[in-house]
Amino acid sequence: MKRIIIFSTLLVALVSTHVFAQDPTRFAEEVKKFENAAANYPEANRIVFTGSSSIRLWVDFKSYFPNHNVINTGFGGSETSDLLHYKDLLISQFKPKQVFIYEGDNDINSGKAPNAVIGDIAVLVTQLLDEGVESIVLISAKPSIARWELKETYEEFNEKLAKLSMIIPNVYYADTWSTMMLNDGTLQQDIFLEDDLHMNKKGYDLWIDEIRPLLIQGK
C-alpha cells in the first residue's frame, strides 16, 4: 500500500490546483445520524454507497440490491472535500469490502476545475485502499437538464475519472453519463424530478444497469 500512497501523492501534486473548499461542518447535523450506524448491518461483504444527493435521494435504494449488504450514506449537496472530511463516519466505520462513490457533480457546479476534483478523489481512494477496501467504484458525474451548460466540463471530468480508475489497482469506473444520453447525443428528458437535476425511478433504473456488473458477490 505504501507504493499506492506514494503514487497517489505524486498524482495529486501533478493534477491539483489550489481551490477554496467549503466548510464541511455545514453537514454536521445531517451526518450525525450515521454515528454508530455500523451496528445496524451484518458484518460480511458490506458495500457502502456514498457521495452527494444523487445517492442520498435513491429512496428505494435497497430494492435494487436484494442480494447484497448495501449501506447508503449519501449526504446533502456534498463535494469531494466534504466526503474526505467525514470519511471515517460515512465509510470507514463500516469496514466495507466495496465502496461506490458519487462525487464531482457539485464540485464542478461550484466552479472547481476537473483536475482539482480528481486530486481530491485520488486522496480519498488512496486512504480507502490503505484501510483494506477491496474494490472501489467511481460513478461518473451524471448529465442533467439543470446543469447542461456545464456539459463539456463534466465530460472532461468524467474522462479523467475513467483514467484514474485505469491506473490504480482495484478501482473501477461506472459510466452513468452515457446510459442517460440518447443515441443522437441529446439528454433523456423524462428521467428527472421537477428540479431537472435529481433523478426519478427511471433514471436509477438506467444507473443500475451500469452498477450491477461491478458489484461484489455475496450477501
Image (cartoon, rainbow, N blue to C red):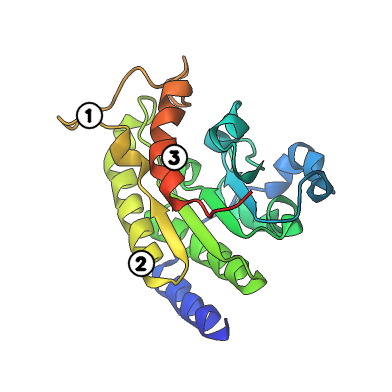
Of all residues, the one furthest to the left in this rendering is 184
The residue that disc 2 covers is 166
Q: Nearer the viewer, residue 158 or 67?
A: 67
Residue drawn 40% across the image and 63% down it: 165
The Cα atoms of the two marked residues, 2 and 1, are separated by 26 Å
Q: Using the image, tell me which numbered label, if any, was put on residue 182.
A: 1
Q: Amino acid at mark 3?
A: Asn
Tell me the quarter of the picture where residue 164 sits. Answer: bottom left
Crowd tier of the residue under label 3, counting other residues whose Cα lies within 10 Å: few below 14, some 14–19, many 20 or above: some
Q: Is residue 32 left or right of residue 103?
A: right
Point out the image quarter for the N terminus: bottom right
Above-or-below relation of 25 to 180: below
Crowd tier of the residue under label 2, counting other residues whose Cα lies within 10 Å: few below 14, some 14–19, many 20 or above: few
Q: Amino acid at mark 1?
A: Leu
Q: Secondary structure at mark 1?
A: loop
In this rendering, the count of numbered labels is 3
The Cα atoms of the two marked residues, 2 and 3, are separated by 25 Å
Residue 174 picture location, percent across and down = 40, 49
